[in-house]
Image: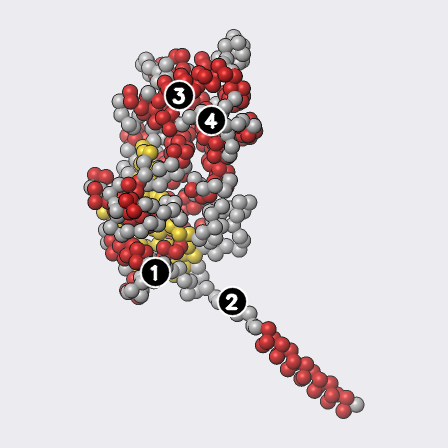
Amino acid sequence: MFEQTFKNIDDILHKDAGCGSELDYVEQTSWVLFLKYLDDLEEDKKTHALLAGKEYTPIIANSYKWNIWAAPKDKDGKLDHHAALTGDDLTDFVNNQLFGYLKKFKASAEHADTLEYKIGEIFSELKNRIQSGYNLREVINRIDELRFRTHAEKHEMSHLYEDKIKNMGNAGRNGGEYYTPRPLIKTIIKVVNPQIGEKIYDGAVGSAGFLCEAFDYMRKAKNLTTTDVETLQRKTFYGKEKKSLAYIIGIMNMILHGVEAPNIIHTNTLTENLADIQDKDRYNVVLANPPFGGKERAEVQQNFPIKTGETASLFLQHFIKIIKAGGRAGIVIKNTFLSNTDNASVSLRKLLLENCNLHTVLDLPGGTFTGAGVKTVVLFFEKGMPTDKVWYYQLNLDRNLGKTNPLNEKDLAEFLTLQKTFADSENSWSIKVADLDKTTLDLSAKNPNKKEEAALRDAKTILSEMRQLDSETNSILNSIVELL
């Protein structure tokens, strides 16, 4: 039901003059979907309050409730077409009244970690791009068919929303910026193993895939107490995101996964001066896939001791600084970080090896990130002690990865098994930091156990050997003739 509804909505938005791409489809579906979700959430809260003998104060005022402006019902429970706004009346209400009302929640909310504040933040960043009020009416009608009351419904909804984010990444523009393959995220989280009570951070949060998966992992790790639930909801997951669309999608994704008021801030992480980070600002766990290939301005670079325009290198400095002593990280980065010879890259490898225990490097094949042709590695490290030895695992698959043949959890099963004991195998090996080139600190993933394929012979050698064989054959034939 959810899947078909999304397809129908995309078809509607495709013909609207205000929506020109998959990114627009996701953004516009998101705000309508959020308001319907919010209406169902309020109904659940009202029911729980009644069962507890308490009074529930609704978040949304009556005239802005979903069942008043979006989907008023007749006595049979069907859409009341006489009361439901449509056409210009609908777009005028949404653009000039609804969005203005919802924006005010940001200023009126008691705290930044409340659902009210997140409502205000979302609608301060968004605008309605659906130009036709008739198309908007169709979208609303489709979303009104959805229900988010049971755990199964919410799980299906969050799963399909993830698929939409994945498709948006596959659409080409911005590639893997919004979507890190979920099997990879789950594997990284299993290695890092976050615990309830720890603060988890992603400074390049994107669609919040790392935080959503960490929430699911921790929620299922043990039977949760009421205190555990409260800790997971409000004091565990933190993120920052620079781009408006990714920020909105990240918040939506976390809410649909069950985190009611995500601690995600809309800001450029790299404008924060590393010298200003104090112990109270630090986190136990960092999970991230920072954007690579970007270039930052000179004034942003001034916030970092190692000056470079490469965005991913600045993020790595930020992450090293913001982790608590004894904290852990799993970070995706371009594999060229391991071997680049420029001064910034060498200095950054030195910083990492001297301040952290880089215990594991997972070397990923090309095609891991659909739409992004770069090769990547995952760095796993603990802060507080220098690196003595690095264990590598090279993921060698018997197929090419791509949109129709993506990475799966089974592909990474051997890595998880071997990583527990840092075992050597055909695909894994270790190097001692003491054996590295002291000038370059080159950390390239060069597998010493991989059997070298026999080099192809050149054409001259092959022709020479053919002539020699022909000569030998002729000699044998002549000998036979003489005997006859």
> Tag 2, which secondary structure?
loop
Counting from the top left corner in percent of width and height, residue 221 is at: 36, 38
Identify which amino acid the numbered label 3 is placed on.
Phe
Marks 2, 4: nearer the viewer:
4
Sequence-wise, which precedes: disc 4 or disc 3?
3
Residue 448: x %, y % from top left = 41, 65
How far apart are the two marked residues, 3 and 1, measured between alpha carbons?
Answer: 51 Å
Q: What's the residue at 48%, 53% (across, down)?
A: 366
Could you give the CA–CA distance between mark 2 and mark 1, rounded to whole angstroms?
28 Å
Upstream in sequence: badge 2 or badge 3: 3
C-alpha gap between disc 4 and disc 1:
46 Å
Residue position for label 4: 129
* Relative depth, front residue between 312 and 402: 312
Per the image, the residue denoted by label 3 is 99
Q: Is residue 387 visible?
A: no
Residue 267's mark? none
Tell which residue pokes out farthest to the top in this image: 75
Which quarter of the figure is the N terminus placed in? top right
Quadrant of the image occupied by residue 278:
top left
**Identity of the residue drawn at 33% across and 20% down:** 104
Residue 411 higher or lower than 152, as above or below:
below
Q: Amino acid at mark 1?
A: Thr
Residue 111, x across and y down, in percent? 27, 25
Residue found at the very far front of the displayed protein: 298
Q: Which residue is disc 1 drawn over? A: 341
Give the Cα distance between marks 2 and 3. Answer: 63 Å
Q: Where does label 2 land, which residue?
A: 453
Q: Judge from the rendering whether residue 313 lies leftward or rightward of residue 374; answer left or right.
A: left
Q: Is residue 303 left or right of residue 136?
A: left
